[in-house]
Amino acid sequence: MLEIVNLHSNYGEAIVLRGVNLSVPAGRVTGLLGRNGMGKTTLIRSIMGLTPPTVVKGSVKFGTTELVGREPDQVAGLGIGLVPQGRRLFPSLTVVEHLEICPRRDAPAGRSAWTIDRAFELFPRLGERRKHRGNQLSGGERQMLAIVRALMSNPDLLLMDEPTEGLAPVMVQHVENAVRILRDEGLTVLLVEQNLRSALSLIDSANILETGVLVYSGTAQDLKNSPDILQRHLGV
Ligand SMILES: Nc1ncnc2c1ncn2[C@@H]1O[C@H](COP(=O)(O)OP(=O)(O)O)[C@@H](O)[C@H]1O
Ligand SMILES: [Mg+2]
């Protein structure tokens, strides 16, 4: 569904991605792992067309469509949803208002469209907070809102950048359950995670990014059984 070939991205003089090759197959949860500062968010931003960084070389194909050079709203309109790292929200808008103002797109053939009611089925806790404003939500509730906000555009591919970062254990479970539900519905997900235990319970395949290149691609099961790789590239 997404094919990244030889992708190079810079922040001015600082070269961050140095020829990334990555495949995201349809209907699977693909993991993107790696220590802090290795370029995971840079890769996600490069896919979405968000600047900085600047993509200087390489290709990102979504189906047959080249994404490099497109604006973020165009990329979103093609069917890619983003749950950004740090879950940016509007402090003064309520939960429902966030969901009312997000850009919509028709659901892909054969899949039911996301609605506010369906969002609250996925995260009942968010439904209970429907009138609360962005700045009144806990970290976990913000993350839930960031996820359903991305879903409201009925994406074919969901990019999730460290969705469990900084969350209390019970909130991590809520987010993990949601990813499982989305996976079971056949949504394609590219999941960036630092939390290895969480990642390994959710992903089908694992990719490890280290200083801007992919140093491991394999099944989640193989990675689990490779203590040397976990130690060398993830320090665990
Ligand atoms: N806006 C920016 N300007 C300059 N350098 C940046 C910027 N954002 C990130 N970087 C650098 O790019 C590298 C990769 O960062 P990032 O993609 O955020 O890593 P990760 O998401 O894997 O933690 C780091 O060295 C970071 O300092
Ligand atoms: Mg990051």
Image (tube, rainbow, N blue to C red):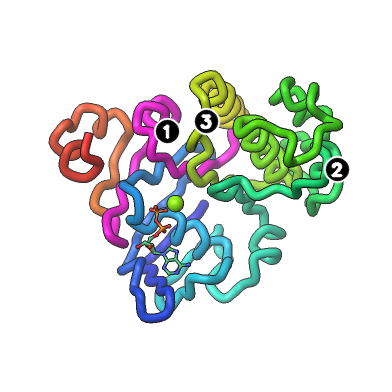
Q: What residue type is labelled 3?
A: Leu
Eye-nearest disc, 3 or 2? 3
**Whole-Å distance between the Cαs marked 3 and 1?**
19 Å
Point 13% across, 36% down: residue: 228
* Along the viewing direction, whichever of 93 and 176 lies nearer the viewer: 93
- Mark earlier in primary sequence (3, 1): 3
Point 86% across, 44% down: residue: 100
Point 48% across, 71% down: residue: 53
- Residue identified by numbered label 1: 203
Eye-nearest disc, 3 or 1? 3
Point 53% across, 38% down: residue: 163
Q: Could you tell me residue 151's position as x and y percent?
A: 70, 41
Q: What residue type is labelled 2?
A: Glu
Q: Could you tell me residue 60's position as x and y percent?
A: 48, 65
The answer to whether residue 40 is visible is yes
Vertical placement of residue 64 versus 113, above or below? below
Q: Does the magenta stretch include residue 210?
A: yes
Q: Is residue 135 left or right of residue 49?
A: right
